[in-house]
Amino acid sequence: MGKIELPTQLPKDFFLGAAMSGPQTEGAWQATGKLPNLWDRWSNLNITDFYNLVGSYGGNDFTRRRDEDIQIFKDLGLDSVRTSIQWSRLMDKDGKLNQAGADYYHELFAAFAKAGIDVFVNLYHFDMPAYLYDRGGWENREVVEAYANYARAAFDEFGQEIKNWFTFNEPIVEPQQRFTNAVWYPFHHDFAEARRVQYGISLAHALATHEFRLAQAAGTVRADAKIGLINCFTPPYTKENPSEEDLEAVRIVDGVDNRWWLDLVTKGEFPQDILDDLDRSDIDLGQRPGDEQVIKQGPVDWLGFNYYHPARVQAPSKKTDQYGNPVFAEEYVWPDAVMNKSRGWEIYPKGIYDFAMTMRDNYPDLEWFVSENGIGIQGENANKDEKGQIQDDYRIEFVRDHLKWVAKAIEDGAKCRGYHYWAVIDNWSWANAFKNRYGFVEVDLDDNYSRHYKKSADWLRRVATTHTIFDA
Ligand code: BG6
């Protein structure tokens, strides 16, 4: 196929901004009465699991540098920023508002508002408070209820300040990382548990969405506010000439990772084929009478799509793994894949377009935005010029190519309203800590977290202020 000429202009009212999260930036892990979340617990238990022994405690020093960072966003021409409230900061152990935590966020939101930057607020970014995990985490209905209570408290407290709310960031990731792949605390290899967690999160999402609707009807939340969900949808691909079994693998991966959430947030239900598959594998989700009514509250006003890489799968070579878990698919290594070797993720900008077309065709009424997209590179210091500035042309290329496919998707009818880059300022990446750097702005750990523009920052400013996708 010949090279497609892609558009280079984004709509005038398209928004461009930054994505970040509370646990990866705030630090101040014991200030304002914040309680430990699972990241703090894991850091305390085994700091050697974290790259260069950097645990959750300091974030990227955002709390101390808040005003400086907001000025950076402003200077780069960004109109909006998404961050998250930390549940463990806003609420105490008895489910009551922690006023010092609330004041922290009031000040933060006021600082953004003063700079003319719209803050999007997400309520959960993989940061379960440790005491709630001890009560059973997402598998326990009391914890699901506690989340709804927390969401209500947040809507009550900040409902007049915030327009764009999200219940969860990437709700598929905790089931995968904590409970299937065992790479995050508590390191379980249990497919059935992962699905129960997925189900518990889904209920929590629906309850919180219901709370939002009630708060809006009561006038506690602004009339122009919207509620959404953010997920890392991975468009699934398989081999060029797939067998029926390969296509079956695609169906299931797409069903569990993507359609599950898309059906929840558009129809208030789950895909029946996946419920049947789970049933056939004797996986008990812990459903109870009345749950269907709860799930019906799931539909949202719009959606966030985090996109880093596609999923490539094929038929599995075995039916169960060494832990006795069912295996529905195996990774397919595409020989033509271009890789970001630092992160081990494939770079495939067209995936953003393919997902956009799926949305247009299958969920035509739903508006959405690219809520995260970015490239994390290890050892960027090696690319410093004589003045000490990181020359990150690869970042310009990455974002440029993805944005062009976004522009093409819009031209072809996608209801994509904006784009947030992850993470405009380098931040803490979970167990990888500061190994892979995502920022247009460097955080120098050897110089007290000081901020320095990389080469790409100037490019970003030009794009953000003109909506033109420049080549360089
Ligand atoms: C997304 C998350 O999955 O990807 C972020 O929402 C995360 O929290 C980002 O930091 C990049 O992934 P990583 O693992 O390299 O930090």
Image: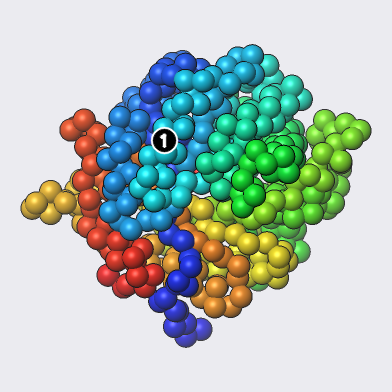
Tell me where residue 49 appears, x and y as whole percent.
42, 25
The structure's colour scheme is rainbow
Tell me where residue 235 appears, x and y as whole percent.
60, 60
In this view, 15 is above or below 83 = below
Tell me where residue 412 appears, x and y as whole percent.
58, 78
Q: Residue at x 44, y 65 (%)?
A: 402
* Front-most of residues 212 and 1: 212
Q: Which residue is drawn at 51% across and 29% down?
A: 86
Point out the residue furthest to the front here. 219
Q: Is residue 70 visible?
A: yes
Q: Quadrant of the C terminus?
A: bottom left
Which of the 4 image quarters holds residue 435?
Answer: top left
Tell me where residue 416 appears, x and y as whole percent.
56, 65
Q: Residue at x 67, y 54 (%)?
A: 301
In this view, 65 is above or below 280 = above
In this view, 259 is above or below 365 = above
Q: Name the residue under label 1.
A: 108
Beta carbon of the mark 1 residue lies under 8 A of ligand 1: no
Looking at the image, residue 115 sits to the left or right of residue 362; the answer is left
Q: Is residue 198 visible?
A: no
Q: Which residue is drawn at 41% across and 26% down?
A: 56
Q: What element carries label 1?
A: helix
Within 10 Å of the Cα at label 1, are there few (<14), some (14-19), or many (20+) other Cα atoms? some
